[in-house]
Amino acid sequence: MTTTLNLDLGERSYPIEVGTGLLGQSETLLHRVAGRQVAIVTNSVVGSHYAAALERQIDAVAAQRITVVLPDGEAAKSWETLDRVFTALLEARFDRSALIVALGGGVVGDMAGFAAAIYQRGIEWFQIPTTLLAMVDSSVGGKTGINHPAGKNMLGAFHQPLGVLADLDVLATLPARELSAGLAEVIKHGAIADAQYLDAIERDLPKLLGGDWSAMGAVVSRSCEIKAAVVAADEREGGLRAILNFGHTFGHAIEAELGYGVWLHGEAVGAGMVMAAELSCRVDGLDRAHAQRLRALIAAAGLPVEAPAWPLETWLRRMSSDKKAQAGNPKFVRIPRLGEAVVGRVPSDDLAATVAATATLLQLPGGLGYIGPFPHPQTRPQ
């Protein structure tokens, strides 16, 4: 069964298609690639599984098709990797009517979308997310970009795709660690916008971890609904859209300080949400029982609930370059209650106490890095 949602942005509106079997045949995709120059941008891991099926579908209707295979991993989200896309497009003589199709997780989507935003001053693109995290978060909303050593996603553009095709079948090959990382963003949506949805996630977590695609389809659809509604109200993050960064100010600091790719984005967000919930208790009066409930759910999803034990100065240095910071002063998304979010600066004493209470994960002996990947309570059947 296929569910089609719509992100309402006027003339830039587009469909979000969620279902199974979509890579084999999707009229939503075929309508947009017919008669055009098409560049599939993927990575070495995803491409080995799914590029051939997509190539057959596109070759049947496109005027020309190339496939650009990028390295896998967050560490590849750089100018050097992005230049591979531009070189391939130029060598194939792709013009301004060409279309980029992103086949991969959030890293591929962010880079492919950024390439589309700036190639010949902007061409169209289409999203086919292949991780749970990308399906429920990064594929929806038009944020594109690459990382800089000073901060995550600091270089990029808002560039909406023509559509999003989320084929649940591709999650069958997703490693358990990546599945848990995606659940961080699912949990986030419930925490900031829908307490009843959070109840359903808590109830269905064993099914989600066990590969129940009916349960998975429900959370992908609901998370996309929540994000689409927020983006429609605030496309360029002038206000409301910032609530989608719950746990991310702390999480981005973890990713940047550890080195991109040491922890997955969802792992960093998992620990970041625990920190943000603690901050919410101190600043906004969040019931501590609710903060503990959220922490337990994050842990049950196989995500970290402790952050690295760095000094406050380290946290402040990283968070001062966050995109939401103003003049070097970070702002934080908090939840006064489950299902509701606010954004703003916080008292320095409360921030210091939050870091002291939650940044407690010790470095391994010999400087070997930090504990991870994290234990997963249930492994899906192969």
Image (cartoon, rainbow, N blue to C red):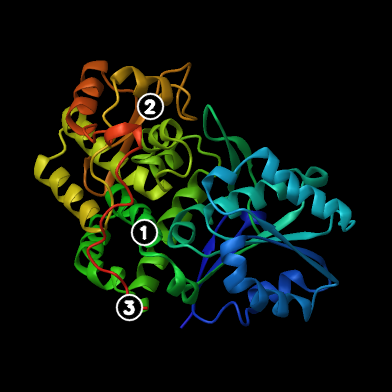
Mark 1 and mark 3: Cα distance apart in space: 14 Å
Regarding mark 2 in the picture, which secondary structure is present there?
A: loop
Depicted 290 relative to depicted 162: above or below: above
- 288 in relation to 134, above or below: above
Label 1 secondary element: helix
Give amino acid for label 1: Arg
Task: Identify the disc placed on residue 331.
Answer: 2
Residue 139 in percent (x, y) is at 54, 56
Q: In terms of sequence position, does the residue under pointer 3 or pointer 2 come before the other? A: 2
Q: Amino acid at mark 3?
A: Pro
Q: Which residue is mark 1?
A: 177
Q: Is residue 140 visible?
A: no
Q: Which mark is residue 301?
A: none
Between 6 and 57, the one nearer to me in the picture: 57
- Horizontal and vertical percent position of residue 257: 42, 30
Q: Is residue 64 left or right of residue 107?
A: right
- The C terminus appears in which quarter of the rendering? bottom left
Label drawn at residue 381: 3
- Left or right of 76, for residue 355: left
Q: Earlier in the sequence, mark 2 or mark 1?
A: 1
Q: Residues within 10 Å of mark 2 (few under 14, many from 20)?
A: some
Residue in the image at 39% along x and 73% along y? 217
Which residue lies at the image location 64% right of the left edge and 74% below the top edge?
28
Nearer to the camera, 238 or 309 = 309
Q: Residue at x 71, y 47 (%)?
A: 115
The alpha-carbon separation of the residues under discs 2 and 1 comes to: 29 Å
